[in-house]
Image (cartoon, grey):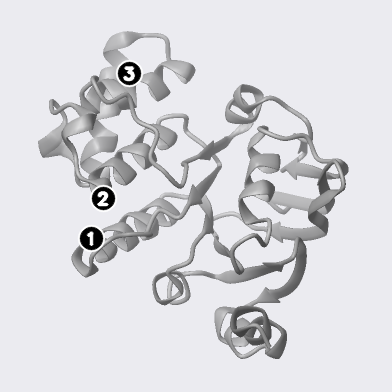
Amino acid sequence: MDLLRVESVSKKFGGLVANNDVSFTMGEQEIVGLIGPNGAGKTTLFNCIAGYYPPSAGEIWLQDVNISGMSPEQCARAGVGRTFQIPRTFASLTAQENVMVGALLKNHRVKAARQRASELLTFVNLGHRSDKPAGSMTISEQKRLAVARALALDPKLLLMDEVMAGLNPSELREAVEVVLKIRAGGISCLIVEHVLEAIMPIANRIVVLDYGKKIADGRPSDVSNDPHVIAAYLGE
């Protein structure tokens, strides 16, 4: 059974078609990169999967649950976690408290949520920063903190929006390491990413959007040589 099925999804805002009849699937323990030029509709599709927008047409299935049109909280409870392009943290709370916010959605016992937060901060290499306010962290640390908070929901699918953007080479390696550990732990990752040199080597598959439509779906090596993808990026 597929973990995620996006079936003929379209999303319109008035006369603007942001997603146009997009279909693809994801399996368990898979990393899928969602790429495309600016304005291709990647974040809109993310928002449909995560419950922020209802699709105008089509359906989205997480295993045997139709999550089309569910609220973000309902999608989270069904097993969808997500991060945002700009990390959304509670700046005045400590790193541990930030992750506890996510953990408490699934486990209402504070002691258990605190323990889970500590485990996840160590997992994303932030254990040494657990008592520091989120607002004092670097962008790289805040991105990993957002990942830890999303993982606290115990998702089956993690949507990651440009988790590698703006990082220096050492921070990029650390981010890639975390993503690979997430997949090894049994969680599938759908990643919107512009840093192609980071996502291409680790993705099982790449889905490419252009002007809201899917123009390619396959192995990274095949997609990178697809003339339609090259034309979309180079404007030919």
For the point 66% across and 81% down, the residue is: 229
Q: Does residue 104 lie above or below 195 as drawn?
A: above
In the foreground, 75 or 21: 21
- Give how far across and how far down residue 169 sits, in percent: 23, 69
Q: Reading the chain from its start, which is encountered first: label 3 or label 1? A: 3
In the foreground, 133 or 18: 18
Residue that carries the numbered disc 1 in the rendered image: 171
Q: Are marks 1 and 2 in contact (CB under 8 Å)?
A: yes
Give the left or right position of residue 39, taking residue 175 as reference: right
State which quadrant residue 117 falls in: top left
Query: Which type of secondary structure does the marked residue at label 1 adopt?
Result: helix
- Amino acid beneath label 1: Glu
Give the left or right position of residue 123, taking residue 88 as reference: left
State which quadrant residue 227 falls in: bottom right
- Give how far across and how far down residue 38 sits, in percent: 59, 63
- Amino acid beneath label 2: Ser
Query: Which type of secondary structure does the marked residue at label 3 adopt?
Result: helix
Dot in front, 3 or 2: 2
Q: Residues within 10 Å of mark 3 (few under 14, many from 20)?
A: many
Kindly report the distance in space between the C-alpha atoms of the residues bearing marks 3 and 2.
24 Å
Residue that carries the numbered disc 2 in the rendered image: 140
Residue that carries the numbered disc 3 in the rendered image: 113
Kindly report the distance in space between the C-alpha atoms of the residues bearing marks 1 and 2.
6 Å
In the foreground, 213 or 198: 213
Which residue extends farthest left?
A: 128
